[in-house]
Image (cartoon, rainbow, N blue to C red):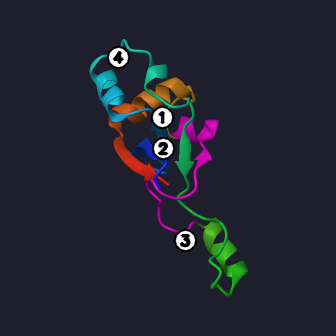
Amino acid sequence: MARGDQTKVHFKGKDEDFIIFIDDVKTANDWKTDKSKPLAQVVSAFKVFVTHKYVSTPPSHFRAPLLWKILFHRKLTGYPRHGAQGNLDTASTATLENEFGTSVVEDVIKTIIEKGTIQETEVW
């Protein structure tokens, strides 16, 4: 049985994929046209999440973990980008600075809402 809907905004950056959670699509679209509305009425939380481009641990079937570490540190291997899926971690200040030129969460969230893709999913 479904528990409800979850709405997120996905922004594909140059190195990472960023996710924020919003209350609903209509409110976000209204904010895009009228930025005088408080951002607190749009977002579920003032947090920016990231899905990592590379995974540092080898897959369970990989038989040479040392080789994996060497290749990983040279960025020659890793899993492809997860997009809007996968494990979410809070984006670090350095990650936000590298991608958006600022670590001010409100400014980053505004950019993600303006340039990102809104996705609705059903939560079970």
Mark sitting earlier along the chain (2/3): 2
**Res. 21 mark:** none
Of residue 123 and residue 77, the one placed in the foreground of this image is: 123
Mark sitting earlier along the chain (1/3): 3
Mark sitting earlier along the chain (3/4): 4
- What type is the residue that disc 4 sits on? Lys
- Residue marked by disc 1: 100
- Residue marked by disc 3: 76
As measured in the structure, the alpha-carbon distance from the residue carrying label 1 to the one carrying label 2 is 14 Å
- What type is the residue that disc 1 sits on? Phe
The magenta segment? 75-98
* Image point (45%, 44%), residue name: 6
- Residue marked by disc 4: 35
- What type is the residue that disc 2 sits on? Ile
Provide the secondary structure element on which disc 2 rests. strand
As measured in the structure, the alpha-carbon distance from the residue carrying label 2 to the one carrying label 3 is 26 Å
- The answer to whether residue 24 is above or below residue 76 is above
Percent across and percent down for residue 90 are 62, 42
As measured in the structure, the alpha-carbon distance from the residue carrying label 2 to the one carrying label 4 is 20 Å
* Image point (48%, 38%), residue name: 21
- Residue marked by disc 2: 19
Provide the secondary structure element on which disc 1 rests. helix
